[in-house]
Amino acid sequence: MAEKFLELLVTPSVAKAQEHYFGRSQQMPGGAKCDALTDDEMQFIQSRDSFYMATVSESDWPYVQHRGGQPGFLIVINPTTLAFADYKGNRQMLSTGNLAVNGRVCLFLMDYPQRTRLKILGDARVEDARQHPELVAKFAAPDVQRIVERVFLIDVVSFDWNCPKYITPRYTAVEVEESVKPLRQRIAELEAELKTGN
């Protein structure tokens, strides 16, 4: 776990809860302005085809939204900056509106088959695609550029890896197809043998 993560999230009330249940808290001394992503985090991010993003509304309600695309659609610009193109959707604009008032975000990235998750804290800003076609060209694949409405840029503040406990393995259709491909091939071979009488 990066130090800044606990420094930011272990508030006095969290420390009190930790002390109540475990006899001590995990408070960290202040220090670094942010924790840069390492190669492990960057490779994990670039291999994801989806993530969840939490923002906070003006009425102090948390809001979580799912984002998906081809693996690597969440782009690592450098160890402290991420970006992704945001497509046409349900027109609610909840995350975009929330970020106009409070730029803090938490990203939650899952690898269900490997039972791995990465949490990222950051400061985000949203740029209108109509005013920044250069960002669309840079951060969206050519086949989806026409449906990009916004580009999100996120300055990474810190991150944390969670333990795999209680993560239920889940698989995409592509992952399932890859795993059953040898079985399908063997079935085809056996069927062919039956037809020829061997």
Image (cartoon, rainbow, N blue to C red):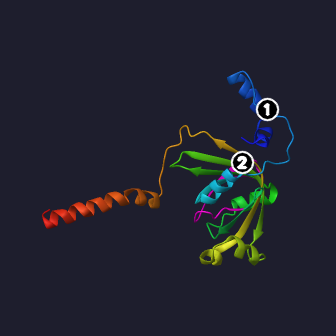
Identify which residue is drawn at 79% across, 42% down.
4
Q: Secondary structure at mark 1?
A: loop
Above or below, comparing residue 44 to residue 31 in the picture? below
Above or below, comparing residue 8 to residue 53 in the picture? above
- How crowded is the residue under tag 1: few (<14 C-alpha within 10 Å), some, or many (20+)? some
Mark seen at residue 7: none
Above or below, comparing residue 59 to residue 8 in the picture? below
Which kind of residue does numbered mark 2 sit on?
A: Trp
Identify which residue is drawn at 66% across, 51% down.
40
Q: Tell me: 155 left or right of 52.
A: right
Mark yes or no: residue 65 visible. Answer: no
Tell me if residue 18 is in the magenta stretch.
no
Residue assigned mark 1: 27
Q: Secondary structure at mark 2?
A: loop
Question: In which quadrant is the C terminus drawn?
Answer: bottom left
Identify which residue is drawn at 82% across, 48% down.
34
Q: Position of residue 197 (x, y in %)?
A: 12, 64
Tell me if residue 60 is in the magenta stretch.
yes
Q: Choose between 9 and 141: the one closer to the eye.
A: 141
Residue assigned mark 2: 61
Mark yes or no: residue 169 visible. Answer: yes
Magenta range is 54-76
The furthest residue to the top:
23
Q: Position of residue 81 (x, y in %)?
A: 76, 59
Which kind of residue does numbered mark 1 sit on?
A: Gln
Question: In which quadrant is the N terminus drawn?
Answer: top right
